[in-house]
Image (tube, rainbow, N blue to C red):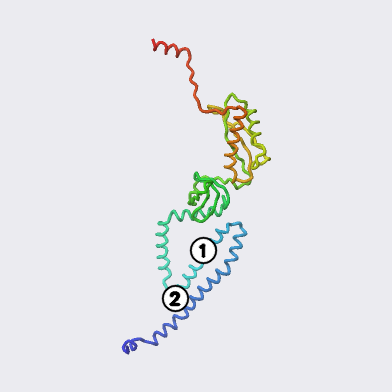
Amino acid sequence: MSNILSAIDIDKIADLLLDFAPKLLTAILIMLGFWLLFRISRRALRSILGRSGMEQALIIMLVDHIYRFALMTFGIVMAADQVGINVGAALAGIGVIGLALGFAAQDSLSNTIAGFMIFWDKPFAVGDWISVSDHYGRVADITLRTTRIRTLDNAYIVIPNKNIIDNILTNHSKEGDLRVVVPLSIAYKEDIDRAREVLLQAVEGLEQILPEPAPSVVVGKLDDSGVNLNLRFWVADAAVECPMMDRTREIAKLALDAAAIQIPFPHMQIMVDDEQKRILAGVDN
């Protein structure tokens, strides 16, 4: 034991500690300064971003996560430099690790970037009814990586944000009042004006249909088997769009049946002229 103590140069260790202590104290003060800077600036940044109309979820992500991480990382680098750590080599190592992680998580990074674009552009908000990627439903939640919607069947669908950005999206709630179009069809022999009158009387006074603009019936297409009509009306809430389509379709069918207006079905008519009859007759002989 005495040999070990004699081998230790107490004075040299004391000199090293005295030389290292100011550097360590400086590093601690630097870290404390960056932490105080974050605490002081966080509220101001939140307020500035909030006044710009940015979503609260994105503000929290930017300020409490990304801004704090960047600020504290810079503080750690400066503090490490004070105590003699080779910051350049450390940053190079971190860069290599970050590059490897980036290649391994390309889809996650793409979805995160798409999430930022959704928060920035605001094509929809929580509570809106949207159609995207063959899915229709009410937006339940928006995160940086995914958008979650609840369908009319009460199914919970999680859609990667990259799919939201890369596909055509329809927001049924964005502009308030929404026009609903219900396609119907009548036979060619039926009177269009009479069919229009019957349909408008059938939907008149329905609670969810707005009186203005008034419902209308227009010819959509002259199809092979009949005349396609579009029953059009407006609703105030996108949530009733699909239920009202189902309800008015049934009401319209019953009203047309009651008025003896024929609804066509696909059929084919074959015409045989006299020449074909003679040929067929010669074949029979």
Nearest the viewer among 248 and 100 is: 248
Amino acid at circle 2: Val
Vertical comparison of 5 with 97: above or below: below
Circle 1 residue:
65
Image height check: is 16 above or below 268?
below
Query: Compared with residue 179, is residue 22 higher up or lower down, i.e. above or below?
Result: below
Badge 2: residue crowd in 10 Å (few <14, some 14–19, many ≥20): some
Query: For this rendering, which residue is in front, 82 or 237?
Result: 237
Q: Amino acid at mark 1?
A: His
Which disc, if any, is residue 83?
2
Seen in the picture, residue 236 relative to 66 is either above or below; the reply is above
Task: List x then y, in percent, for residue 28.
Answer: 49, 76
Q: Residues within 10 Å of mark 1 (few under 14, many from 20)?
A: few
Where, by quadrant of the figure, is residue 252 drawn? top right
Image point 51% across, 67% down: which residue?
Answer: 71
Q: Quadrant of the N terminus?
A: bottom left
Looking at the picture, how far across and down is residue 102, in whole percent?
42, 58
In front here: 85 or 183?
183
Quick check: 285 left or right of 212? left
Measuring from the top left, give residue 42's x and y in whole percent: 57, 66
Of circles 2 and 1, which is in front? Answer: 1
Side of 76 where 215 appears, left or right = right
- Whether tag 2 and tag 1 are in contact, CB under 8 A, the answer is no
Query: x and y percent of residue 211 in the render?
Result: 68, 40
On the rendered image, what quadrant is the C terminus found in? Answer: top left
Q: Secondary structure at mark 2?
A: loop
Earlier in the chain: of badge 2 and badge 1, it is 1
